[in-house]
Amino acid sequence: MDKSFSQVGVTVDETDPRDPGAQCDRCGRRGTVARAMRHSQPPLVFRYCSACWPEAQQELEARQGEAFPSSSAPVAWSSSSRSWHDTRSFLILIATPPSGGRAPTSMELAVIAQDIRAKAAEMDGPIPSDIQDFLDRHLPPAA
Protein backbone atom coordinates (compact mmCIF):
# COMPACT_ATOMS: atom_id res chain seq x y z
CA MET A 1 0.00 0.00 0.00
CA ASP A 2 1.36 3.40 -0.96
CA LYS A 3 1.45 5.98 1.73
CA SER A 4 1.06 9.62 1.03
CA PHE A 5 1.31 12.61 3.25
CA SER A 6 1.30 16.31 3.01
CA GLN A 7 3.30 18.78 4.97
CA VAL A 8 2.28 22.32 5.73
CA GLY A 9 4.64 25.00 6.95
CA VAL A 10 3.65 28.33 8.38
CA THR A 11 6.11 31.18 8.53
CA VAL A 12 5.33 33.54 11.37
CA ASP A 13 6.41 37.15 11.06
CA GLU A 14 7.77 38.06 14.48
CA THR A 15 8.75 41.60 13.56
CA ASP A 16 7.25 44.51 15.46
CA PRO A 17 3.68 45.08 14.24
CA ARG A 18 4.03 48.79 15.02
CA ASP A 19 4.81 50.78 11.89
CA PRO A 20 4.52 54.56 12.03
CA GLY A 21 4.63 54.79 8.22
CA ALA A 22 2.16 52.02 7.39
CA GLN A 23 -1.39 52.83 6.45
CA CYS A 24 -4.31 51.23 8.28
CA ASP A 25 -6.13 48.89 5.90
CA ARG A 26 -9.44 49.87 7.44
CA CYS A 27 -9.43 53.68 7.78
CA GLY A 28 -6.30 54.76 5.92
CA ARG A 29 -4.71 56.45 8.93
CA ARG A 30 -0.89 56.39 9.11
CA GLY A 31 0.66 54.50 12.00
CA THR A 32 -0.29 50.92 12.81
CA VAL A 33 -0.11 48.81 15.97
CA ALA A 34 -1.43 45.48 14.68
CA ARG A 35 -0.85 43.10 11.81
CA ALA A 36 -2.95 40.15 10.64
CA MET A 37 -1.57 37.67 8.14
CA ARG A 38 -3.24 34.97 6.09
CA HIS A 39 -0.63 32.30 5.42
CA SER A 40 -1.55 31.69 1.81
CA GLN A 41 0.49 31.89 -1.36
CA PRO A 42 1.12 34.73 -1.65
CA PRO A 43 0.64 35.75 1.97
CA LEU A 44 -1.99 38.40 2.62
CA VAL A 45 -1.04 41.01 5.23
CA PHE A 46 -3.34 43.58 6.80
CA ARG A 47 -2.24 46.40 9.12
CA TYR A 48 -4.45 48.30 11.55
CA CYS A 49 -4.26 51.42 13.70
CA SER A 50 -5.14 51.25 17.39
CA ALA A 51 -8.67 52.60 16.83
CA CYS A 52 -9.55 50.02 14.15
CA TRP A 53 -7.81 46.91 15.54
CA PRO A 54 -10.41 45.64 18.07
CA GLU A 55 -13.28 45.55 15.57
CA ALA A 56 -11.08 44.37 12.68
CA GLN A 57 -9.75 41.55 14.85
CA GLN A 58 -13.29 40.39 15.66
CA GLU A 59 -14.26 40.44 11.98
CA LEU A 60 -11.14 38.55 10.90
CA GLU A 61 -11.66 35.88 13.55
CA ALA A 62 -15.30 35.46 12.50
CA ARG A 63 -14.35 35.13 8.81
CA GLN A 64 -11.42 32.72 9.15
CA GLY A 65 -13.33 29.62 8.09
CA GLU A 66 -15.95 31.23 5.84
CA ALA A 67 -14.01 31.49 2.61
CA PHE A 68 -13.24 27.79 2.30
CA PRO A 69 -15.53 24.95 1.35
CA SER A 70 -15.78 22.19 3.92
CA SER A 71 -13.78 19.85 1.67
CA SER A 72 -10.65 22.00 1.82
CA ALA A 73 -8.48 22.84 4.77
CA PRO A 74 -8.73 26.42 5.96
CA VAL A 75 -5.74 28.66 5.48
CA ALA A 76 -3.91 29.57 8.67
CA TRP A 77 -4.07 33.10 10.06
CA SER A 78 -1.93 34.81 12.66
CA SER A 79 -1.94 38.24 14.20
CA SER A 80 0.35 40.34 16.30
CA SER A 81 -0.26 43.63 18.03
CA ARG A 82 0.97 46.06 20.60
CA SER A 83 -2.59 46.91 21.59
CA TRP A 84 -3.77 46.98 25.19
CA HIS A 85 -7.05 45.62 23.82
CA ASP A 86 -5.37 42.24 23.28
CA THR A 87 -3.88 42.26 26.77
CA ARG A 88 -7.31 43.02 28.22
CA SER A 89 -8.90 40.21 26.17
CA PHE A 90 -6.25 37.77 27.42
CA LEU A 91 -6.82 38.76 31.05
CA ILE A 92 -10.57 38.26 30.62
CA LEU A 93 -9.93 34.86 29.05
CA ILE A 94 -7.74 33.60 31.90
CA ALA A 95 -10.14 34.97 34.52
CA THR A 96 -12.83 32.54 33.33
CA PRO A 97 -11.28 29.08 32.88
CA PRO A 98 -13.16 26.58 30.72
CA SER A 99 -15.66 24.29 32.37
CA GLY A 100 -13.70 21.75 34.35
CA GLY A 101 -10.46 23.67 33.81
CA ARG A 102 -8.34 25.15 36.51
CA ALA A 103 -7.74 28.81 37.17
CA PRO A 104 -4.19 30.15 36.97
CA THR A 105 -2.21 29.88 40.18
CA SER A 106 -1.00 32.99 42.00
CA MET A 107 2.52 32.18 40.78
CA GLU A 108 1.30 31.96 37.17
CA LEU A 109 -0.55 35.27 37.55
CA ALA A 110 2.63 36.86 38.92
CA VAL A 111 4.61 35.65 35.89
CA ILE A 112 1.93 37.00 33.54
CA ALA A 113 2.00 40.34 35.37
CA GLN A 114 5.81 40.47 35.12
CA ASP A 115 5.60 39.78 31.38
CA ILE A 116 3.00 42.51 30.89
CA ARG A 117 5.12 44.98 32.88
CA ALA A 118 8.26 44.04 30.87
CA LYS A 119 6.49 44.69 27.55
CA ALA A 120 4.63 47.84 28.61
CA ALA A 121 7.12 50.19 26.91
CA GLU A 122 6.47 48.43 23.58
CA MET A 123 2.71 48.84 23.81
CA ASP A 124 0.53 51.51 22.22
CA GLY A 125 0.01 54.18 24.86
CA PRO A 126 0.09 54.10 28.64
CA ILE A 127 -1.08 51.14 30.71
CA PRO A 128 -4.88 51.35 31.08
CA SER A 129 -6.17 51.52 34.66
CA ASP A 130 -7.81 48.05 34.62
CA ILE A 131 -4.56 46.44 33.48
CA GLN A 132 -2.61 48.47 36.05
CA ASP A 133 -5.01 47.11 38.69
CA PHE A 134 -4.13 43.56 37.59
CA LEU A 135 -0.41 44.38 37.86
CA ASP A 136 -0.88 45.93 41.30
CA ARG A 137 -2.72 42.81 42.53
CA HIS A 138 -0.23 40.26 41.16
CA LEU A 139 3.23 41.82 41.11
CA PRO A 140 5.34 41.54 44.23
CA PRO A 141 5.84 44.87 46.02
CA ALA A 142 8.86 46.84 44.79
CA ALA A 143 11.85 46.50 47.07
Image (cartoon, rainbow, N blue to C red):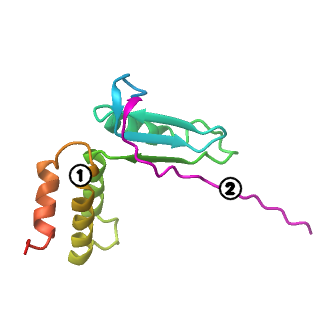
Relative image position of residue 78 (x, y in whole percent): 49, 48
Question: Which amino acid, mark 2?
Answer: Val
Q: List the residue tagged with mark 2.
A: 8
Identify the residue at horizontal 36%, vertical 23% (top origin): 27
Quarter of the rendering containing residue 8: bottom right
For residue 105, above or below residue 14: below
Give whichever of 128, 59 is nearer the camera.
128
**Magenta segment:** 1-22
Q: Which mark is residue 121?
A: 1
For residue 32, above or below residue 94: above
Identify the residue at horizontal 21%, vertical 71% (top origin): 110
Give whichever of 72, 100 is nearer the camera.
72
Count residues near mark 1 (Cα–Cα under 10 Å), then give few for <14, some for 14-19, many for 20+: few
Q: Sequence order check: which comes first, mark 1 or mark 2?
A: 2
For residue 1, above or below residue 8: below
Identify the residue at horizontal 15%, vertical 48% (top origin): 128
Q: Is residue 139 left or right of residue 59?
A: left
- Identify the image quadrant of the N terminus: bottom right
Q: Secondary structure at mark 2?
A: loop
Q: Main secondary structure of the magenta part?
A: loop
Q: Is residue 18 left or right of residue 45?
A: left
For residue 114, above or below residue 133: below
- Identify the image quadrant of the C terminus: bottom left
Count residues near mark 2 (Cα–Cα under 10 Å), then give few for <14, some for 14-19, many for 20+: few
Relative image position of residue 96 (x, y in whole percent): 27, 62
Q: Secondary structure at mark 1?
A: helix
What is the distance, in whole Å, between disc 1 and disc 2 at their CAs? 35 Å
Q: Is residue 25 left or right of residue 110?
A: right
